[in-house]
Image (cartoon, rainbow, N blue to C red):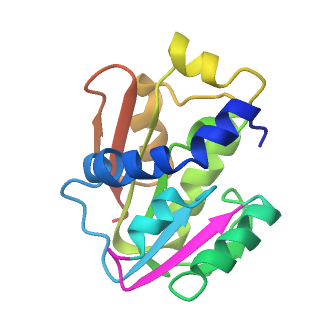
Amino acid sequence: MAMNWFHRKLCSSEKWARLVESQLLPWSLDGVDLGDNALEIGPGYGANLRVLVDQVPNLTALEIDERMARDLDRDHGARAKVIHGDGTAMPLPDNEFSSVVCFTMLHHVPTAALQDRLFAEAFRVLRPGGVFAGSDGVHGLLFRLIHVGDTYNPVPPDSFARRLAAAGFERIELANPDGRRQRWRAIKP
C-alpha cells in the first residue's frame, strides 16, 4: 500500500478524524447493527478506530502496515485488539465476528482479484447473520489527484453488488448518492 505525502498528512490529521466522527461513520453505518464483536479491516492512522471503540463491546483492528499496527496498538490497545495482518489472508478464525467494516481503504487494494479475496475473507470470518459494511470513494478527478503516486484502484459501483454476491453475501445494499462516495452493507446468510 503506497500513500503519497499529502494523503498521509490528510489521513493522520485531526481535521480528518473530526470528519470521520461527524460525517463519514454516521453516514456509512446508518442503520447498521455492529453487534458485539466487530472487525475493522485497514484502520490506517486510526480515525475510524477512535470512534468504533465506543460503538461495540469488542473491537479487533487488522492493519497491513506493521508500523501503523504498532502505533494503533500503543494508542488503542487497551480498548481494541490490534493485529498486524493482511485483509486478503486474515489470521483470524471462521465465523468469529458479528460485523466486519472497512472505510476509505478498498481503493488501496491493488487489484480487483485481491479486493475479491478481501470480500471472501470478510465473509469467512463473519458469523452467519453478520454484516459486512463500509464506505469508499468512487473514481473521479479529485479522488485520483489525491492519490497521485498512491495505490489507486476504486471499486466500480456498477460491479460492487455482483462481486459481493460472488463472495456469498446476500441482502446487499449499495448507496452512491453524490457520485463521489459509496457505502455498502451485505449479510452473510
Quadrant assignment for the N terminus: top right
- In the rendered image, residue 16, in percent from the top left (x then y), is placed at 48, 45
On the rendered structure, is 188 left or right of 88?
left
Highlighted magenta segment, given as a residue range: 54-63
- Left or right: 110, with 80 as reference point: right
Write the residue at 54% across / 10% down: 141
In this view, 64 is above or below 69: above
| 170 left or right, relative to 137 | left
Coordinates of residue 170 in the picture (x, y in percent): 32, 53
Q: How many marks?
A: 0
Dominant SS of magenta comes to: strand
Q: Quadrant of the C terminus?
A: bottom left
Q: Is residue 73 left or right of residue 169?
A: right
User: Image height check: is 45 above or below 139?
Assistant: below
Give the residue at the far front of this rendering. Answer: 14
In x, y percent, where is residue 106? 57, 42
Q: Is residue 4 visible?
A: no
* Residue 60 magenta-highlighted: yes
Q: Which of the pair 170/57 is nearer the observer?
A: 57
Q: Is residue 132 visible?
A: yes
